[in-house]
Image (cartoon, rainbow, N blue to C red):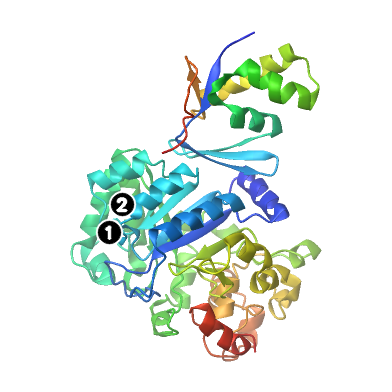
Amino acid sequence: MTSKRYARSPQVAARRLGDEIMIMSAPDSTLFTLNEVAALIWEASDGSLALNEIVERDICPAYDVPADLALQDAELLAEELVAHGILLRCEEPVREALEPK
Amino acid sequence: MTALMQRMGAKALQLGIPLSVQVDLTYRCNERCVHCYLDHDDHGELTTPEIKHLLDELAEAGVFFLNLSGGEILLRKDFFEILEHAHALRFCVKLKTNGVLIREPQADRIRSLGVHSVQISIYSHRPEVHDSITKIPGSLSRSVEAIRFLKARGLKVILADVLMIQNLHDYPGVRALAAELGAEFTIDPTVTPRMDGDRSILNLNVDQASLRQMFRDETLVGNVQEFCAPPGPADDDDLDGLPCGAGHTACYVSPYGDVYPCVQFPLPSGNVRRTPFLDIWRHSGQLIEVRSITARDLPSCSQCIHLVSCTRCPGLAYMEGNMRGPSIQDCEKSFARSGIPSANLLSRKPPASRLVQIQGLSAAAQMSSASFA
């Protein structure tokens, strides 16, 4: 199991719209939407929980998927969001969430 | 508009969410533009805590796009405190300003607070024309400097040009200036009545011949033949369609807390000093009425050949006396574009009632019967 941790970037605008989340990345003016599952991962990514913990806690029970398969997909998604600057990779657990100030 | 934005707009409409809200932080301004519709005196602006509370309410209501405008927003001493709060609430913030007060430190703050874009009003590339419109000598130079400061920090900047008789021939120059600065360019040929009811500034609007010429400028409209083609027939979907997002997925809050469907649609619908924003959004009788109107309910426009392609503004129609009526300025644009007069132009009569003015709710309650007459 991975212990990678991610945190929401404080530099993006975001708002839940029904079961999705809209995200605007200011640096490149790109609008993204996260689907239901991606939205759960985004909201839970505060830098303190590892991705496997988020998957086990929020994704597996809700969608009845095997943990290893769900984690594989979640890692791909998280790295894609990192590439767009929407999530940040955390080397160590973050005590205080990286929220905009 | 991108397909993604269209999908999000449709979803917000379905969920009843105000996706986009403009908040005017002040009507005070350091320019005195000849075409401005505002009363620049301060009649009791929302305080800093009131605005922060409003932003909390807007975030809770699901607002994503927050347009901070005025007046000149940087005249508020608490502007950056407000912007910091908006940033903390993860709004997608767009600023509208003349840029005169933006120097390098302000540009740094705007950049660090994740602002999506900054729209700056530029009326001409020639100082003598721009400054004569703003009535502030040196204002073009100051605004252009601000654009350079913002662009140097990687911010998206949009030059907004209001076309009127004074600057009719200068828009290619403003567009070239935008390109030189790495900014985007937008143009609007609509001058609206003053909020005190004075219609004299409508005389600044460009005439029909100039509009026609502008709509045949392929650098502006793209494919002229397509843009100016006679409109197609309306079908049931068109007749069941909504006039625009005002009151449906968007609204406007004045510096005094008054809520309207749009900045150009001064139908008083509540005040956030007295009623929580979400209650106004969901239960205001005025907003519910606005939402009930489809194209089918517009007596003359539903019969008009231009229904499908017209840019009819329900707010301008309201200011002309009837929110279900036509907006003459858009009739004239449709005519200039296609050469075909609208149903309203064919049976043109003087406006049915006096001009509706923006004012506080207590006064508005007294005049509501007259407005809907």
Residue B132, by quadrant, is bottom left
Measure how far apart labels 1 and 2 are at the Cα level: 7 Å
- Where residue B84 appears, x then y in whole percent? 39, 46
Query: What residue type is disc 1 on?
Result: His
The local crowd at label 1, few if under 14, some if 14 to 19, many if 20 or more residues have their Cα within 10 Å, is: many
Q: Residue at (57%, 23%) from the top-left corner?
A: A80
Q: Residue at (31%, 52%) from the top-left corner?
A: B177
Per the image, the residue denoted by label 1 is B125
Task: Name the quarter where the C terminus of chain B is drawn.
Answer: bottom right
Q: Secondary structure at mark 1?
A: loop
Per the image, the residue denoted by label 2 is B177
Subunit under mark 1: B
- Where residue A22 appears, x then y in whole percent? 59, 40
The local crowd at label 2, few if under 14, some if 14 to 19, many if 20 or more residues have their Cα within 10 Å, is: some
Q: Residue at (58%, 11%) from the top-left corner?
A: A3
Residue B327, by quadrant, is bottom right
Farthest top residue in view: A1
**Nearest to N terminus: mark 1 or mark 2:** 1
Residue B236, by quadrant, is bottom right
Q: Are marks 1 and 2 in contact (CB under 8 Å)?
A: yes
- Where residue B182 appears, x then y in whole percent? 34, 43
Q: Give the left or right position of residue B137, taking residue B57 as reference.
A: left
Q: Give the left or right position of residue A28, taking residue B73 as reference.
A: right
Query: What residue type is disc 2 on?
Result: Leu
